[in-house]
Image (spheres, rainbow, N blue to C red):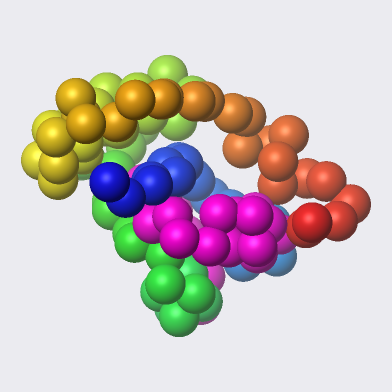
Amino acid sequence: MKNLVMGAAKGYGWDVLEPFVTSCKMNCPSAELVLIVDDISNFTRDKLIRANVTLENFPAELQRGIPNNTRWKIFSEYLDAHGDCEQSPTLATLSFKTTCLQSSAA
């Protein structure tokens, strides 16, 4: 069974996402990191790809929505399309802002 960390990022730049990605990679090195993204720059997209982050775009019909409200539907659809959810014994959620906006990535 593979570990998976999912998040949603709308309008964030690499300067905001980098501590989250670094922390995730340091603390969960075997986990796949998937970000559902919208309104990010090509520079940020390239940095995320180079950091081995799997990127999925917000579906067009949800792009005007607020990520906090729409991400659960997108996460569920991603899991349905990419694996067997019943094999995962634990589902934990966390606030991106709480994790990302710490003073240290560790």
- On the rendered structure, is 4 left or right of 28? left
Seen at 21% across and 31% down, the residue is 87
Residue most extreme to the left: 81
Up-down: is 30 above or below 64?
below
- On the rendered structure, is 45 left or right of 95? left
Q: Which residues are magenta?
A: 18-45
Residue 103 position in % (x across, y down): 89, 52
Up-down: is 96 above or below 3?
above
Observer able to see residue 80:
yes
Q: Nearer the viewer, residue 97 or 25?
A: 25
Residue 21 position in % (x across, y down): 59, 60
Instruction: Confirm whether the magenta stretch covers residue 21.
Output: yes
Seen at 78% across and 58% down, the residue is 105
Classify residue 76 by image quadrant: top left
Residue 12 position in % (x across, y down): 58, 53
Q: How many marks?
A: 0
Residue 85 position in % (x across, y down): 20, 29
Up-down: is 12 above or below 26?
above
Q: Nearer the viewer, residue 90 or 23?
A: 90
- On the rendered structure, is 63 left or right of 105? left
Classify residue 106 by image quadrant: bottom right
Residue most extreme to the right: 103
Observer able to see residue 70:
no
